[in-house]
Image (cartoon, grey):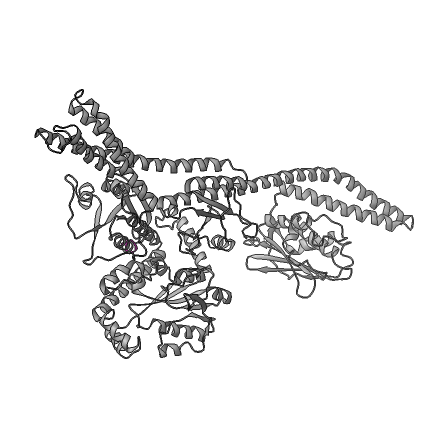
């Protein structure tokens, strides 16, 4: 048989089904997208809202900015609007979107204008698009507006076109996740006409706008960007549709990207260019920063800028890493090859720079050593832009660090002078060339102990001290012999080189020590967690390692059975906690607090403990110095700690479940064995008792004694006990798997008749109503077992209903199922117990005086499911209860006509 090579991948189909299920629970985001303000996005959004409201949908205006445009304000009439949230800010009252009111109102569709808006301080989220994400997670559809200059990856391009850098941006992933994007387009001439007519801004503002942002060339370029972005989105949708419809992959492999981040102001532009290219190629991308010994000594403000660029890359979807190496190009190439990255994006400055002899530029080095990798360069703009404001970069080096550096230079001076004084008595005993070696030894020590700067000072100062104290004429900088110039030069060069190598070695040792500490912490923590048996031990271990590795206080919130977080557990000093933030973090499965996009002003970091199956709690960390968590490697180490804690908690959870299950299975096995033994031993005497009771009744009737009814009562009780023992034995056989249905073609009419015959005495006080049409198809089943199901159901109906009430049996053939129903006119089932009554040893009325042990319905369920059917119970609308079970209908057998 030929095979189909284009069969769909089951894992891919399962993933697609899960994504569709998740998307069905999430609200839909519709964006009205434009090239610039004034094209009519808000107008189009309100027109769409009125159209949806006319269709009967629940539409609410969350926030709309009309900017004084009367034709836009008219469209809000008749639409329900949420009251804005009033926030007092420096004596001014600001009106912001009320997220809590929107979640409480929970409309089907809500209008939230200006997605890139920055919320006022003390709001739950710093950005409005984060408010929208919470609305979508709650299942509320959102309609909003965005301009092209607010898309994060296009921010620098728009700034280069217009000369104005927009600070309010929306991440590309939010734009890409929109269910629908509607382009609101307006030709530049028409937009300029609207400006002059005062339909966008006031007349004096409009004239300034025309001369700056709204120049015709700018509008044409922005319109092209908006059209291209929308066209790319449509193209992606078309390709996704083709791929889904054809069930085949168009591209088998894709090259991934690597963005190189370095010092200077090109980092952000390289990151955004790589993000756009990765989105265009629909591929993943990485961003790395190589920390060489030279870059290790950058000023604090430049290091903060690099960390900020790495964080921007993370927000745009990149995997980030900080590499420590002597050669940046070699480290980048090693990383690219180990991660199979086929394209490298680097920045290219237009300024010529001086390179030390023998050191090629970074870009040329990459080109020479990696002919198999594509290099993509991003040029610097002609006019340099500042990435951060002066306030963002104001903090420089702490006073303690500056003092330590000054002390290192002071110690260097003292060491050089000390060597000079110590070597003075050696004049005449040793050659001057040997004394030089003592000074070089001092340079090596200074370079190893204090680093490059003090080593350079030590080399220069050693030459000066050697010249003054040891070279004739002494105590003078003059030189009597020209040969000493060569000695000084060699001494200086050797000292500088030695100091450089020693400081580099010191740096590599420090980096290796940090890496070893991180690896050791992970190893020790995983080893300790693997032996934890209870949750309290996990908390104690996590607190210990977090305090050691991050110098921070930690606590863990764990959920109860209902999904609500209990009081936090902490082994050491408890940090200041906010249970509401922890619950939000647990429910949303997202981090919050310091260093995140949610409640950034909070000094604690709240991390969800994500295990493979479920979120197992929330880890709260309060660092002494927030910068310890801002370093990418430290944050990645903390995330790894959180994963280890989550896995340990999940392991403990499943071990507890496994132990409980094992105990239940063992107790069930023992109980079944006991029941089987008792049932088997009781059947023989009960059978004899029934036979003797029948014989006694016949003898008493023949003797015309008045005690015949007592003998009948003995017989009925013996039969009831026999049926109870039979049920116990049958349940034991079902649990052990010994009971196998003997399938054969049977008639439902005959099985029902046989059941009624077996319960003739029990049902004698109840009128019967049978609704079994003639000509029902045959059912392939075990007649004895199905009869047992009907006997148990009819006996229950007789036991729990008053004498004289009607009991009915109905059968119907529906599609491929035979549906049998047994109903009564009794008190019905307790509310909420419709499924529980099918459990073993469970009775519908716990305080009932009716005898029984609660096994009948459990046996019925096991028999029906063994036949491939289902059984259920419910209360009737008029009176009583009904029990319904179904059996599958197979293709009917062929009946041969007799000759």
Residue extending farthest to the front is 475
Quarter-wise, where is residue 239 in the image? bottom left
Residue in the image at 29% along x and 57% along y: 390
39 vs 723, left or right, is left
Asked if residue 870 lies in the magenta stretch, the reply is no
Q: At x 23% / y 42%, what residue is drawn?
A: 329
Q: Is residue 280 magenta?
A: yes
- Where in the figure is residue 144, as x and y percent of width and height? 38, 67
* Magenta part of the chain: 277-281
Visible residue check, residue 158:
yes
Q: Nearer the viewer, residue 450 or 811?
A: 450
Residue 113 lies, in percent from the top left, at 38, 68
Give the left or right position of residue 767, taking residue 511 as reference: right
Would residue 738 be visible to someone looking at this image?
no
Residue found at x 59% / y 59% = 813
Residue 449, how many percent across, how many down?
29, 34
């Amino acid at each position: 048989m030929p095979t189909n090579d284009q069969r769909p991948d089951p894992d891919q189909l399962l993933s697609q089904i899960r994504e569709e299920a998740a998307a069905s629970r999430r609200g839909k985001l519709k964006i009205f997208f434009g090239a610039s303000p004034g094209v009519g996005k808000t107008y189009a959004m309100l027109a769409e809202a009125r159209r949806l409201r006319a269709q009967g949908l629940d539409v609410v205006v969350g926030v709309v900015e009309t900017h004084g445009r009367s034709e836009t304000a008219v469209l809000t009439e008749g639409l329900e609007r949420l009251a804005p949230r009033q926030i007092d800010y420096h004596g001014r009252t600001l009106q912001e979107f009320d997220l809590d009111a929107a979640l409480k109102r929970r409309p089907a569709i809500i209008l939230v204008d200006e997605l890139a808006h920055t919320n006022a301080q003390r709001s739950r989220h710093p950005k409005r698009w984060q408010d929208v994400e919470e609305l979508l997670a709650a299942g509320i559809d959102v309609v909003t507006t965005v301009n092209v200059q607010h898309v994060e990856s296009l921010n620098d391009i728009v700034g280069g076109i217009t000369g104005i850098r927009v600070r309010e941006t929306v991440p590309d992933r939010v734009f890409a996740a929109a269910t629908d994007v509607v382009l609101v387009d307006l030709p530049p001439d028409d937009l300029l006409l609207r400006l002059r007519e005062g339909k966008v801004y006031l007349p004096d503002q409009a004239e300034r706008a025309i001369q700056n942002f709204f120049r015709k060339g700018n509008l044409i370029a922005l319109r092209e960007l908006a059209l291209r972005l929308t066209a790319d989105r449509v193209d992606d949708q078309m390709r996704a549709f083709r791929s889904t419809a054809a069930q085949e992959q168009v591209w088998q492999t894709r090259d991934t990207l690597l963005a190189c981040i370095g010092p200077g102001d090109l980092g952000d532009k390289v990151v955004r260019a790589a993000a756009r290219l990765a989105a265009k190629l629909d591929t993943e991308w990485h961003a790395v920063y190589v920390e060489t010994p030279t870059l290790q000594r950058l000023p604090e403000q430049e290091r903060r800028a690099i960390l900020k660029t790495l964080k921007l890359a993370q927000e745009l979807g990149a995997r980030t890493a900080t590499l420590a190496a002597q050669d940046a190009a070699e480290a980048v190439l090693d990383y690219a090859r180990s991660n199979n990255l086929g394209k490298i994006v680097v920045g290219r400055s237009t300024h010529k720079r001086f390179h030390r002899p023998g050191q090629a530029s970074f870009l040329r080095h990459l080109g020479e050593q990696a002919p198999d990798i594509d290099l993509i360069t991003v040029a610097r703009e002609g006019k340099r832009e500042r990435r951060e404001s002066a306030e963002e970069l104001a903090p420089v080096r702490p006073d303690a660090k500056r003092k330590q550096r000054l002390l290192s230079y002071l110690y260097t001076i003292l060491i050089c002078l000390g060597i000079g004084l110590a070597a003075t008595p050696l004049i005449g005993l040793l050659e001057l060339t040997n004394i030089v070696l003592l000074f070089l030894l001092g340079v090596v020590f200074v370079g190893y102990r204090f680093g490059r700067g003090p080593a350079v000072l030590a080399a220069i100062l050693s030459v000066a001290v050697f010249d003054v104290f040891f070279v004739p004429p002494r105590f003078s900088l003059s030189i009597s012999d020209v040969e000493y110039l060569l000695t000084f030069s060699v001494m200086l060069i050797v000292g500088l080189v030695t100091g450089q190598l020693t400081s580099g070695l010191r740096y590599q040792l420090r980096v290796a020590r940090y890496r070893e500490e991180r690896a050791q912490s992970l190893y020790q923590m995983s080893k300790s967690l693997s032996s934890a048996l209870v949750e309290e031990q996990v908390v104690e271990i996590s607190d210990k390692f977090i305090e050691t590795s991050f110098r921070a206080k930690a606590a863990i919130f764990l959920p109860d059975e209902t999904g609500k977080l209990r009081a936090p557990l902490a082994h050491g000093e408890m940090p200041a906690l906010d249970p509401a933030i922890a619950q939000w973090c647990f429910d949303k499965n997202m981090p919050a607090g310091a260093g995140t996009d949610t409640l950034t002003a909070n000094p604690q970091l709240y991390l969800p403990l994500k295990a493979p199956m479920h979120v197992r709690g929330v880890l709260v960390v309060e660092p002494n110095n927030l910068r310890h968590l801002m370093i990418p490697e430290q944050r990645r180490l903390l995330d790894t700690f959180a994963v280890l804690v989550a896995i340990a908690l999940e392991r403990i959870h499943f071990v507890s479940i496994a132990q409980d299950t094992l105990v239940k299975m063992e107790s069930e096995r023992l109980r079944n064995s006991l029941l089987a033994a008792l049932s088997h031993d009781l059947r023989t005497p009960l059978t004899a008792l029934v036979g003797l009771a029948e014989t006694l009744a016949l003898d008493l009737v023949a003797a015309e004694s008045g005690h015949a009814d007592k003998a009948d009562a003995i017989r009925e009780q013996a039969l009831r006990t026999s049926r109870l023992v039979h049920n116990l034995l049958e349940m034991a056989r079902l649990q052990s798997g010994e009971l196998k249905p003997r399938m054969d073609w049977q008639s439902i009419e005959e099985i029902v008749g046989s059941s009624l015959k077996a319960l003739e005495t029990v049902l004698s006080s109840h009128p019967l109503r049978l609704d079994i049409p003639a000509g029902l198809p045959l059912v392939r089943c075990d007649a004895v077992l199905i009869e047992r199901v009907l006997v148990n159901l009819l006996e229950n109906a007789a036991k729990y209903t008053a004498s004289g009430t009607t009991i009915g049996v109905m059968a119907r053939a529906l599609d491929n199922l035979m549906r049998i129903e047994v109903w009564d006119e009794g008190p019905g089932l307790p509310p909420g117990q419709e499924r529980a009554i099918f459990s073993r040893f469970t009775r519908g009325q716990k305080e009932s005086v009716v005898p029984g042990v609660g096994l009948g319905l459990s046996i019925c369920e096991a028999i029906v499911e063994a036949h491939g059917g289902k059984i259920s119970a419910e209360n009737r609308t008029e009176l009583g209860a009904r029990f319904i079970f179904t059996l599958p209908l197979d293709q009917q057998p062929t009946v041969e006509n007799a000759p």
